[in-house]
Amino acid sequence: MTASASEPVKTVPAERKKKTGPSWGNWRQRLRLWSGLILFTYCLSHFSNHAFGIISVDAMEKASVWHYRIWRNEIGETVLMLAVVTHVFLALWRTGRRRTLKMPPWEFAQLVLGLYIPWSLIPHVGTTMGLANEFGFSPTYHQMLTILWPQHGLTQSVLLLAVWAHAMIGLHFWLRLYPLYHRLRYAALGFAIAMPVLALWGFIEGARRLELAKDVKLKVTKEQFDWLTTFVIEGRAVVFGLIAASLAVILLRYVFGLTARRLTITYPGSLSIRAKPGATLLEMSRINDVPIASVCGGRARCSTCRVKVLDGRAALAAPGAAEKAVLARISAEDDVRLACQIRPQQNIEVLPLVPVKAKAETTENLKDAYYWGVEQDVVVMFVDLRNFTRITESQLAYDVVHLLNSYLEQASAAIRAEGGFVDKFIGDGIMAIFGMDSDTATGARQALRASHRIENVMKALEAEKGPQFQDPIRLGIGLHLGPAILGRIGAAGTSGGLTALGDVVNTSSRLETENKTHQSFLVVSKDVVDAANVALPDALAAEIKIRGKEIPLQIFALSSLDALDIPAD
């Protein structure tokens, strides 16, 4: 680590950030986005037309008049074909530019679907546009449904779902950069599910009606079907060749790179990797299983992959227009760059600035991802010893310390016995975290079982205390579930202790203090109860206002957990 690694990371206050929207990337990314939006508009119109099959095939035909008025004219067809060629070409170009196929699942799914769609779409394009242009065939719903059903019904349905899924993934990871989308996310999810369901329902219902009626005469001759077969074979050969060429480029880069010179990338925690020049820092990190956040998938639209360059900044190329726009939007310092845009040619030392969401992988480099910070849902527990101030004022120091150590030791053991992590001791209080290495349901149940154990600790302390302690030993616990940033906090260059940060911590502490109001032992939020799937028949239900929150928080207060039935993990 160089001397600069000990400098504190400068963060930009929210009020200094510019109020502009997310970047749309460079010109290629903008072209790909706009072409994708044109294709999505076409698909939305086409699939909406399918949905009229729920009513009748005649309804589909009448609705298609408007669809064809937009897309079946010289301007519409030209725009559509340009969008198809542009989108496919840029997708293949970006695939060929990849240095690794390691990527998040959503990005991999979009890539695979994007390669599958052109190959499977060729027969449909050949029938609707090829036969129409070559032989004057009119691709009405009566004709097309009769051709497709039932032999091609399954493949056509899979194609529809693949196209829609590809579009929804792209739209989601573009729109999620905008606050309005988050407010409308449930409506958007409903639309994303309802549209393909209605389209498939209409397609299948209309096709079945025509099959039962058997009164449609196909207007496609054997000569035309032969032409279509040749078109499909040749078209698929071209698409397959382009896909193979893109993947071959990745393979050749890998083979030639085996003998290429290597550079060193150094991350926090004395983690270093060796990588070949040419790839982006994001790709180098993915190849070596080093976690770096990337919400937009490396398209220079978000700023989540930003890193502070601690050493080697002078050897980096200047930021391009897209990177400049993103960095300007967040008022980044000169030593902050986007990992998806920089391509190191010399040794470099970086510090990722955005926490990475925790994942299930257990590779060596991910084991200490907490050094940088990971974000995940956890259950936070606060335990407090009641009347501790009165105890300290009326007892000898030796007795107070003995009681406090006994309580902290036994309560900590109870927490660890149920899989919890003791974050810190705060005077006579304990902060603990559950669900760090499991799902939230397991973490919630562990926290409740640990609370029961701590209740038994309280009873044991009360039974064992000496006659000098006149006041009863009483403990209070608060439990809340929510997203937290887990990280090792400390000065750079030191091994800080793991702790949790975020609103869930403050809320859990607030719930612990609610025990005084309700004269209870445990106050737990409804989020924890729902996650644990437990019933609390004897609990007192209430709502409390949390500072900064508009919606009251639902809580349950319990005086004892003896009757609590917690499901097994």
Image (tube, rainbow, N blue to C red):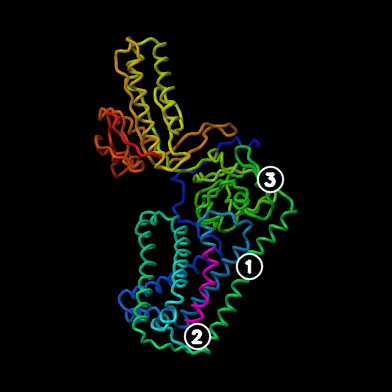
- Residue 444: where, in percent of width, then height? 38, 38
Label pair 3/1, CB-CB below 8 angstroms: no
Q: On the picture, is 54 further left or further right than 173?
A: left
Q: Nearer the viewer, mark 3 or mark 1?
A: 1
Q: CA distance from mark 3 to mark 2?
A: 57 Å
Report the span colored magenta: 112-131
Question: Relative to 463, does residue 433 appear above or below in the rendering?
Answer: below
Q: Residue at x 37, y 28 (%)?
A: 453
- Whichever of labels 1 and 2 marks the residue nearer the N terminus, that label is 2
Q: CA distance from mark 1 to mark 2?
A: 28 Å
Quickly name the residue at label 1: 244
Quickly name the residue at label 3: 264
SS at circle 3: strand
Q: Nearer the viewer, mark 3 or mark 2?
A: 2
Q: Disc 1 marks which amino acid? A: Ala
Residue 529 falls within the magenta-colored stretch: no
Mark 3 neighbour class, 10 Å CA radius: few under 14, some 14 to 19, many 20 or more: some
Q: On the picture, is 271 further left or further right than 109?
A: right
Q: Residue at x 67, y 48 (%)?
A: 314
- Whichever of labels 3 and 2 marks the residue nearer the N terminus, that label is 2
- Residue 531: where, in percent of width, then height? 36, 43
Q: What's the magenta bit mostly, secondary-structure-wise?
A: helix
Q: Disc 2 marks which amino acid? A: Leu
Mark 1 neighbour class, 10 Å CA radius: few under 14, some 14 to 19, many 20 or more: few
Mark 2 neighbour class, 10 Å CA radius: few under 14, some 14 to 19, many 20 or more: many
Q: Nearer the viewer, residue 149 or 61?
A: 149
- Residue 390: where, in percent of width, then height? 32, 16
Quickly name the residue at label 2: 131
Residue 113 falls within the magenta-colored stretch: yes
Task: Residue 439: name its quadrant.
Answer: top left
Question: Relative to 225, does residue 248 appear above or below in the rendering?
Answer: above
- Whichever of labels 3 and 1 marks the residue nearer the N terminus, that label is 1
